[in-house]
Amino acid sequence: MNRNVVFTFFLFCFVTICRGSGTDIALDAKATLLHRIDSLNLLIYTCLLTLTVLTIWVFKHRRVSWLHETGLAVIYGLIVGAIIRYAGSTNHITHINVNPEPGTTYNLSVPPDMLRFHFPASLPITPGDSPIANKTYAYSFRGEIVNVEQNEIDLKATFDPEIFFNIILPPIIFHAGYCLKRVDVNLYAMIFGESVLNDAVALVLSGAIQNYETRYSHDGGFEISGFLGAIGDFIGIFSLSLLVGALMGCLTALISKFTHVRDWPLLESALFVLMSYAAFLIAEVCELTGVVAVLFCGICQAHYTYNNLSSDSRNRTKQLFELLNFLAENFIFTYIGVSMFTFPKHHFDPWFIIAGFITSMLGRAVNIYPLSFLLNLGRKPPIPVNFQHMLFFSGLRGAMSFALAIRNTVSEARQAMLTTTSMIVIATVVLQGGAATHALDYLRIPTGQGSNEESEALPYRDVRSLYHATDTGESRSRMIVRWSNGAKEVIMPWQLNGYDDTPRGGGDAGGGQKARLARVWGALDSRLLKPLLTHARPPLTETLPAFMRPVARLLTTTHQYTQGDNTLRRTDSDSDLCIDDPQIPSSIDPQQLWPGLVDTRISVEGITGSNI
Amino acid sequence: MNRNVVFTFFLFCFVTICRGSGTDIALDAKATLLHRIDSLNLLIYTCLLTLTVLTIWVFKHRRVSWLHETGLAVIYGLIVGAIIRYAGSTNHITHINVNPEPGTTYNLSVPPDMLRFHFPASLPITPGDSPIANKTYAYSFRGEIVNVEQNEIDLKATFDPEIFFNIILPPIIFHAGYCLKRVDVNLYAMIFGESVLNDAVALVLSGAIQNYETRYSHDGGFEISGFLGAIGDFIGIFSLSLLVGALMGCLTALISKFTHVRDWPLLESALFVLMSYAAFLIAEVCELTGVVAVLFCGICQAHYTYNNLSSDSRNRTKQLFELLNFLAENFIFTYIGVSMFTFPKHHFDPWFIIAGFITSMLGRAVNIYPLSFLLNLGRKPPIPVNFQHMLFFSGLRGAMSFALAIRNTVSEARQAMLTTTSMIVIATVVLQGGAATHALDYLRIPTGQGSNEESEALPYRDVRSLYHATDTGESRSRMIVRWSNGAKEVIMPWQLNGYDDTPRGGGDAGGGQKARLARVWGALDSRLLKPLLTHARPPLTETLPAFMRPVARLLTTTHQYTQGDNTLRRTDSDSDLCIDDPQIPSSIDPQQLWPGLVDTRISVEGITGSNI
């Protein structure tokens, strides 16, 4: 470190002796200015997020419900965006128009990636006091200029859209997967899982549609073969992405099971984070869908790897992703607000915007009512009509659609999509989110306000509020802890009134098919995957056929052998992810619990009822 | 979420009906390609980091000491960088040379920020099957092209250097501050603290020197007034940055003390992270030094805010920054390796590189030996000569100097600095880091290998190894817990042999001045700052003069009043940050301890001996 001090002295001598040209010094000043602008941009968002956090706290403290918290982030963003645009001083961007050098040949239909510009030789400038050396500078492609005025605010409070896709979105999606409970069939889990899966499906579907014209259609019109090709694309990409994510999850599980990396929790946590992120990136690099990969990676990490982690790493990864998810989500919503005014690549096309609003509402209706009707055919109790209205009214988040839209704004058509998407997101979050409570009242859906549950897991709040809405009004704090095959099983009150049709329950005629599938999966999971990927019992030596005994022995740890049958069999701890239940008997394996959780809250996500 | 699905159908119709021009579709494909390249870059580093983590684990497991872990990251980086450069396929970057449009006027000595280019009208291209609309595209300034060949690898495995400064460095520095123990004067803390402070000083000093020519000197030569001006700059910027950081820390402490935000630990943690990051950004925006600000912010957060946090937030923030620090550090070292081959803005100047190596070695010697001599005048026991040699031999990290060097590479001189800095960092980390064990042997410094302590806090490993080297060889596991004024005090064995001269100890003649200063600060801290910023006793109503009683009453919480005098007075928990000590008596306030830590390790950083 001392060397740094020396280094600056060295630099001092260097600067004094070999002074740069006037242009170099001016460029230095320019670079410093750009750095300050970057910092200012980040500071604006940091302050906005701080403000949002403080206001969320005040709202929670005072039990304000007329404004949704994400709506708050958007509104703050809009206000600051407008201030930046109309009141802020303009960072004047110098620009000139250029032509190719005479005799240049170029044979592509896209503009070149880079322009090379000789300065100042090619430009008659006012001579300074020091001679300026003629140098060549590189300029890289930015995008189409639609409105010549707009590049004035080009550098204001905007970020490279790739940041959203590669940095902000993955932790949000991973967290959703990491907290998702497997096939627990209460309404909350249904809505939550469906909303996450829907994001993933939408993403893959949009990719397939984008490829439709270039890959399958001859003239861009509708063709049966092209349509089938696009559907094949969708299925292929979705399943391959799922596979990439699941494999990375399983690989992490294997590493954490068969090495002693858990002796160094910091290394273990780092590995966990890196492998999960790699799932996203591998899928993206292979032209698959990273979001799907990271979602299923999260599910696998929760279902398998989590059981092998040290308690330190369990705690750390859960808390890390919870915080990252919270910050990332609020950042996106703030950014949507600010960028509405400052992002230079908006294109307002009124008819397109109107059509966007109408079709998205229509689509929601077409989705909710027929699907509810189908579900109600084999469902007891059926989803009431006022619940369906509420489902129609609520549900949109928008972070994903915004990230999709801002990802690519090279053409005018793309820019129109971004503008429309932003407006739909803002309208949904602010208006529909804010009116949710009134809608609940109007539809006479009983709400369960005042519980402390909402304090955890702020994301997916609307889903959560909706869940509260579907609660039958019984006291949520009444919960049953029972023991089944030596495994603790917690039954929440809402599981008592028909929403709980877990595989083992058998169920009625309508749920028969599903229960069969779930049973096959359950057997595969508990007899092959869990014993292979975790330290769970029974070991593979008991479940695999005799001729595979040597392989099975190799894949079974001492821990799995020595674990007595009379001790707790259930090393599966999906449910630990979110449960913090002080009533759990002290005989339970302490590693199953979050260390040191002293809160007495019972999180909604602490729904278990798991059976192995 | 359903709306997303609808949206893609909508998009589908849109695409089918209003098909874009041929150029738009080609641009879409281009954007997709660029996204894949971005993902590939990130994937390369994620895999490198994963590999590094796994190898670190193997090294720890097998107790390998001939290669330093950061050296490992650099070497992996170098190998992959070379592969990318020489074996990878080239992403051909299309480029043309351009001239200004006839009649352009321009009157600055720097190249314009942006070029506007009409395409394809201005360029005779081979006509495609669809008509291409003439559009205007923006190109933004990238930097000087030194070697025309080099821009071929422009897009390969490199990131915007601003990312290092604004994203990667702050958590590293904050973590250093957050884990720094106040005026604990053992050798480890001395070296650790000095190395961090040195980084901060170097950064401010380099800024002052850069401003020297532009602000204070007339012809760039040495001038007394200019020299004094630069020194004034240094002092001013350093103290203002310190102030910004400390104020943000205190503000966070006040918010966490006087609001109930701790009831929502997620919000609390988010606030903590955001306020700390804001300290960095505010300083950068004000042309101060963000690194100094975030360092002192970290120190204040640990000293004050930490005491107000909920146990969940304490745990979360500590673990979060530990992980971020680990990943960020290893990322930088990997990047140094890769960028040596792939960063297009290297400039190899052999004489400058040789001079760099010589001066940095000389500087280290000039620093260590005279300072040790001065210290030894008033120090018992003195620092032995072989320890001084070891201090000379070890200590450089390089993350900071690299981030400084890569921040600005617009001119050739800057590029030469980057290359030299990179080479010094690589040589130091790989060669000196790897040879450290042999040097210890050669200098006959006893080492304390085999303890589990190193498993925590991988960063600052060399400092830590050095500390181990200075251990006198007594059993480190022998530690004394004693009670002083109701406060737990842990005395580690190395504090028994003279290194421990905490202020209260009085000390000998040499340390008298320092002890006085420390005593004044200690009084201010315990009688004004702690009661103001935390819930610590005695309350301000007891320590402030009578006429300020109303203000004091306002600033004292009920918690501070009701806390009995006979209960534990010490709500200061600096030491909790890193201690995980199972021997602490159960009568201690449970909030003082990390929840749920079941490890039996005693971290080196668990040195306390704090006194209030």
Image (spheres, coloured by chain):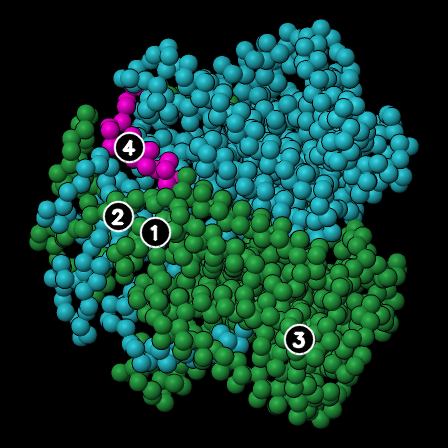
Chain colours: A cyan, B green
Q: Which of the 4 image quadrants contains residue B109?
A: bottom left
Name the residue carrying label 2: A114
Label 1–label 4 contact, CB within 8 A: no
Specify whether residue A92 is in view: no
Label 3–label 2 contact, CB within 8 A: no
Q: Nearer the viewer, mark 1 or mark 3?
A: 3
Name the residue carrying label 1: B154
Looking at this view, is B268 or B527 the one in front? B268
Q: Is residue A212 magenta?
A: no
Amino acid marked by disc 2: Met
Disc 1 to disc 2, C-alpha distance = 10 Å
Quadrant containing the C terminus of chain B is bottom right
Q: Position of residue A425 (x, y in %)?
A: 45, 32
Task: Report the magenta residues as a range.
Answer: B16-35
Name the residue carrying label 3: B440
Amino acid marked by disc 4: Ala
Q: Are marks 4 and 3 on the same chain?
A: yes
Precedes in sequence: disc 4 or disc 3 = 4
